[in-house]
Image: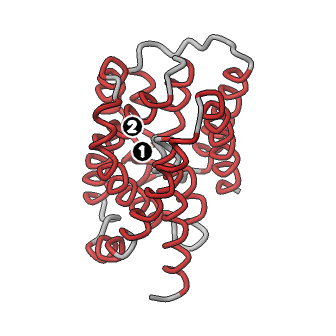
Amino acid sequence: MDWVWIVTFLIILTAAMIQAGTGFGFAIIAIPLLVLLHDAHTAVPLANLLSLVSAVALLPQARKEVDKSLLKPLFVGSLAGLPLGGVFFYFIPVFWLKVTVSATIVIFTLLLIRKVSLPLGNGKRIGAVSGFFTTSLGMPGPPIVLYLASKNTDKASFRGTTIVFYSLVYPISLLIQAGTGHLTLDLVEKSIFMIPAIVIGQMLGSLIHNKLNQQTFRKVTYVLLMVSAFNSLWQAF
């Protein structure tokens, strides 16, 4: 294994740790760093595949914490956004998409910090946006995080709902990316070597989750949202 995949291993370990601790953040951390080592059409399917592995590994606990009333409209909405994002991923340069995403996340996060009420609907529209982001950018998290934060979701339900949502949308996203030829057998084989990084990261992340109180959790949420926004903007340029 050359140095590129050693660094990839460390990136995946860190991303898995953050996801286990908060319920989201795998793609937010992994993709901006992976695109420094791999081309975008490798980084996004790789992050999606490993994020799915990480989410599924957390499912036994997440199923006990999920808020089904929030999950259902989010997932139903995502079914409309997933194929459209796949079209963008295959055909369209993502510069302006990343710029728009970054600006939107910054604005909405600042509004949340200021405790301004956000008209985000019943979850279906947010789910559609998240589905679109999943297949186009590999980042389903920011819209879902904004939505759940606006609902003042407690940290257990927050983590459970996001983990189960990812476990549902990532398989669909991967099928779409396989259909475009960007998810290859070689990439799947390489991802197997990253599974120990997920295991180690999740062990560390579980310790973090147990130590976070609700107030600290919300602060971490806002920080990760802002990081995702500026990372996306940085990638665009």
- Residue receiving disc 2: 131
Choose between 75 and 155: the one closer to the eye. 155
Side (left or right) of 123 relative to 183? right
Residue that appears at 26% across and 49% down: 171
- Vertical side of 44 occupied by 189: above or below: below
Q: Quadrant of the N terminus?
A: bottom left
Residue that appears at 65% across and 57% down: 235
Residue 56 in percent (x, y) is at 29, 50
Q: Crowding at label 2, few (<14), some or many (≥20) Cα neighbours within 10 Å?
A: many
Residue 149 in percent (x, y) is at 56, 24
Amino acid marked by disc 2: Gly
Q: Crowding at label 1, few (<14), some or many (≥20) Cα neighbours within 10 Å?
A: many
Choose between 134 and 95: the one closer to the eye. 134
Q: How far separated are the C-alphas under marks 1 and 2? A: 5 Å
The local secondary structure at tag 2 comes to helix
Residue that appears at 46% across and 13% down: 121
Q: Are marks 1 and 2 in contact (CB under 8 Å)?
A: yes
Side (left or right) of 5 relative to 104? left
Residue that appears at 69% across and 35% down: 103
Extreme residue toward the bottom, this view: 2
- Residue receiving disc 1: 134
